[in-house]
Every structure is written in C-alpha cells, then in structure tokens.
Image (cartoon, rainbow, N blue to C red):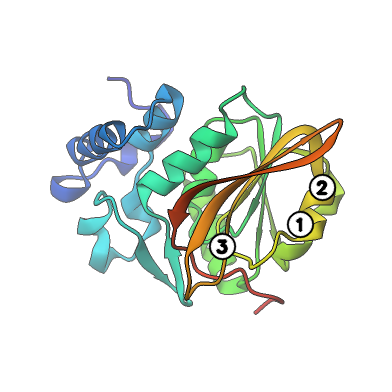
Amino acid sequence: MNIPSHLKKFVGSGMTSQRARDRLVERLRQQGIRSEPVLEAIRFTPRHVFVDEAIASHAYDNTALPIGFNQTISQPYIVARMTELLLRHGIPETVLEIGTGCGYQTAILAQLVPQVYSVERIQPLLQSTEQRLEELGLRNIQLQYSDGQWGWETHAPYQGILVTAAPNEIPYALLDQLAVGGSLILPLGDQYQTQTLTLIQRDEQGIHQQALDAVSFVPLCNGTQ
C-alpha cells in the first residue's frame, strides 16, 4: 500500500493508525460504497487531525463528531456517499463546497477533482481549517469567508456543488451557479424533522430533483459570524 508522501507524517498509532483507516474503509465498502477512488481518498486522509485531540481516538469510527461552534465533522459514510454521487458520471473540473467546516470533506474532494472552491460562514473555524489544509499539502483549494447560501459567483458555473448543511429549501443562488450537465448534492429539510439527501441535476431541459437517503445535518444558517 503506497501512502502519498505528503500524508505519511500524519499516520498515527493505535486508534489513529493506518490500520484503523483500513478498517473504516472496509466498513464503508460493506455499507455499499463502490467507488475505489473515493475509498482510497478516505483510506489515506488523516481524519484524526480534523478533530480535537481529546476525541481523536474516535476519528475512525463511522460517526459524526463535534468540531465546535455547534458544527460537526460528517460521518465518513455520508462523506463517501455524497462524494461518490458527485463523481458518478466522471470527474467534475470544478466543485463548490458550501460549509468548509473542519475541512475533512474538502480534503477528500481535493484529492479527487482538479479544483475545489469552499465557502464557510464561521471565521475562526475557517482560519484554523485553512492552516490545516495547507499542512496537508493540498494546493487546489480556494477558501472564502461568506454566507454559503450565496455560493461563490466569481468562479461559477460549477460542474459539481456539494452542501454540507441542510437548508429548508434549495438556495436559488446555487441553482444559478450550477453548470449544464452538473450535479448539486445537498441535504434538505428542517433539523428537527426528517432530512433527505437530494440530488439535483441540470441539463438543457432544466432542473431535475431526486430524493435519496434519510440523513441528519446541522442547519444551513444565514449570515456570517
């Protein structure tokens, strides 16, 4: 197994070892994740560096974990599922991520697509994440401090858009910034009710929406902080 050289220094021991990552990948495979590139990105990404040291021993459990500011790092299965959906018809040239958070999903995407643009509304979270992604040696990421519901118009249209928090309705700005032939993947619904992982596709005829899995995400909030 060839660990990418820029990630070798992040291989831990015990519960943060490469063996722990391998076990996680096997669990994801058993849950139905089939994309080998996605599984390999998860295998080599050191999830323990994206969470507080106090809970690092749980980093390779298949569960969401707190990252402060009432935010979470998504369950690895959900990260894999959303990423696999994004890549199902090929590799998009540009991907917009709404909700950088701790940067774990961002790091997975950056190993699989040429360019990732990511927006985060919580400034202290974004600052620590930017440093973390630089330490990981991922150079194809641009970050912006902004309200994610407005997307990032400067670099639109995007072949893929991935939203890591749940709005009650699809933000119009994101639909406008989705390229023809592109896919938008997001959870939809109130945090106190059933949320649904939803796939939006744009073609020459318009917008097509498909409901997929029941999920649980933090809400997509207005404004910045």
Q: Which of the numbered marks, if any, corresponds to residue 177?
A: 2
Q: Of residues 97 and 195, which is closer to you in this image?
A: 195
Marks 2 and 1, the one that precedes in the sequence: 1
Query: Whole-percent x and y of residue 147?
Result: 72, 68
**Is 39 positioned to the left or the right of 223 in the image?**
left
Which residue is located at x 85 percent, y 50 percent? 176
Q: Which of the numbered marks, if any, corresponds to residue 165?
A: 3
Q: Are the residues at dot 1 and dot 3 in contact (C-beta closer than 8 Å)? A: no
Q: How many marks?
A: 3
Quarter of the figure with the C terminus: bottom right
Depicted 220 relative to depicted 140: above or below: below
Q: Amino acid at mark 1?
A: Gly
Q: CA distance from mark 2 to mark 1?
A: 7 Å
Kindly indicate the quadrant of the structure image that contains residue 190: bottom right
Residue that carries the numbered disc 1 in the rendered image? 151
Which residue is located at x 73 percent, y 66 percent? 146
Query: Whole-percent x and y of residue 115?
Result: 67, 36
Q: CA distance from mark 3 to mark 2?
A: 18 Å
Q: Secondary structure at mark 2?
A: loop
Kindly indicate the quadrant of the structure image that contains residue 66: bottom left
Q: Amino acid at mark 3?
A: Ala
